[in-house]
Image (tube, coloured by chain):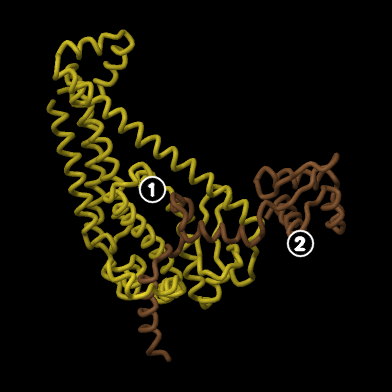
Amino acid sequence: MVSAALLSIVAVCCLVAMEALHRAKWPSRGPYTAVIAWQALGLAWGVSTIGALLAFGLSSYELGAAGGVMAMVSDLITGEFLLAEFSQGLVGISHLVAIVVAVTLTLVLFAGLVASFVQVVRVRRRHHDLLELVASDHPDVPGARVVDHPAAAAYCLPGVLRSQVVISAGALAVLDNRELAAVLAHEHAHLRQRHDLVLLPFSSLKRAFPKVRLVRTYYETVALLIEMCADDQARRKSSSRELAMALLRFGAAGPAPVPAGAMAAVQHAEPDVMRRVNRLLRPDDELPYHAGAIIMGSSAFLLAAVTCLWHIPV
Amino acid sequence: MNRLGELERAVMDVLWARNEPMTVREVGKALAERDLAHTTVMTVLDRLAKKKVVTRAREGRAWRYRPAASRENYVSELMFDALGQTVDRDAALAAFVQSMDGQEAEALRRALAEIEQPRN
């Protein structure tokens, strides 16, 4: 029972920490560190929640979550497990409910990840097939494919062997050469560091719980941080100003303004693109080295602590 | 691009240029300057059919092939994916700038104008 209580506390603390991280100002100064903190908190929340449910549900064994699962599996085969729990009355039933919830949560999270991955691979294959048929090479943009369309778009199509950077004719029209180079550097950074894999767990959560606003908000926060990571890589080669101008030109080439009456109802927060632009034009100091080290260390400690709590036999 | 990819593209260009379903032989004739074997053209069309970008219908003893959609349709489909307008697709591609609503775009246009003003 002690481990169940401790794991519940950790799970709640993870939620509080995620909210704090979402509101914090420092992540834009150290996007890499922040992304790692997000991953550690997300993983620790999932593992501690499932662990708490299991440790409670299997408390009769007094083996903790990990040992309890092993014992339960062997007892389930002989059929003794259910009989023993039912003989405990209400307490036994609450144990069984906790176990069912834990197993369901595990399956939903795991199935969501697999389904997202399959879906992503399918979309990419189709996209790649079509690109081969309609995209062309352009002398101004070596290493990128050009799609002849007036809307401004630049993106990358990640893949192990067939990754590609794609840019539209509309984007070529609004960018000058140095801005174009900055955009390409940004996209190549995504591909080189496989940012798509970093984002995948968060997007699969969003698919699994589409109605949960918090999940969506956190997904968008992580996605923005990943864009900032790529911005940081790009400005090693190009100037910040060119990248910021490219961002603005893309945005300005976007949809026509909505009639004033139509948008009065919703007051938007600052668009994500604007935050990236401001960050490039007026950079804050980078996150100090020791602060980054403390955050990384805490993340590692958190994951180690959750693992230990799974194995506490009380 | 590899040779097969390049051939697929050439075959699609032929099919798009003609407005009617074509047999393997006709496609081969249209690409006569490449001097392709009949089986090569057949393989390429078969691959395109598997990718669902051409459809085929039997006419007499021969299959006739035609594009499943126009080139413009495919370009639109690509851009639709790229601008993140399709649900569930945002994880597949990473766009430089996600699609925005009119209000957000307007805010960026103002910011751009402010920055550019001193220069002009």
Residue at 35% over, 35% down? A108
Residue type at the position of mark 1 = Ser
> What residue sits right under mark 1 in the picture?
A203
Drawing shade for chain B = brown
Q: Is B27 placed left or right of A104 in the picture?
A: right
Where residue A95 sits in the image (x, y, percent)? 19, 22
Where residue A19 sits in the image (x, y, percent)? 21, 52
The N terminus of chain A: image quadrant:
top left
Residue A129 seen in the figure:
yes
Q: In terms of image quadrants, where is residue A7?
A: top left
Describe the element under mark 1 as helix, strand or loop: helix
**Badge 1, how many Cα within 10 Å: few under 14, some, many 20+?**
many
Shown in yellow, the chain is A
The C terminus of chain A: image quadrant:
top left
> What residue sits right under mark 2 in the picture?
B17
Q: In terms of image quadrants, where is residue B74?
A: bottom right
Q: Nearer the viewer, residue A206 or B119?
A: A206
| Disc 2 versus disc 1: nearer the observer | 2
Residue at 70% over, 53% down? B67
**Badge 2, how many Cα within 10 Å: few under 14, some, many 20+?**
few
Q: Nearer the viewer, residue B112 or A26?
A: B112
Q: Is A169 placed left or right of A268 in the picture?
A: right
Q: In terms of image quadrants, where is residue A134?
A: bottom right
Residue at 24% over, 61% down? A26
Gap between marks 2 and 1, in whole Å?
41 Å
Q: Are marks 2 and 1 in contact (CB under 8 Å)?
A: no
Single out the residue that lies furthest toward the bottom.
Answer: B120
Single out the residue that lies furthest toward the front.
Answer: A261
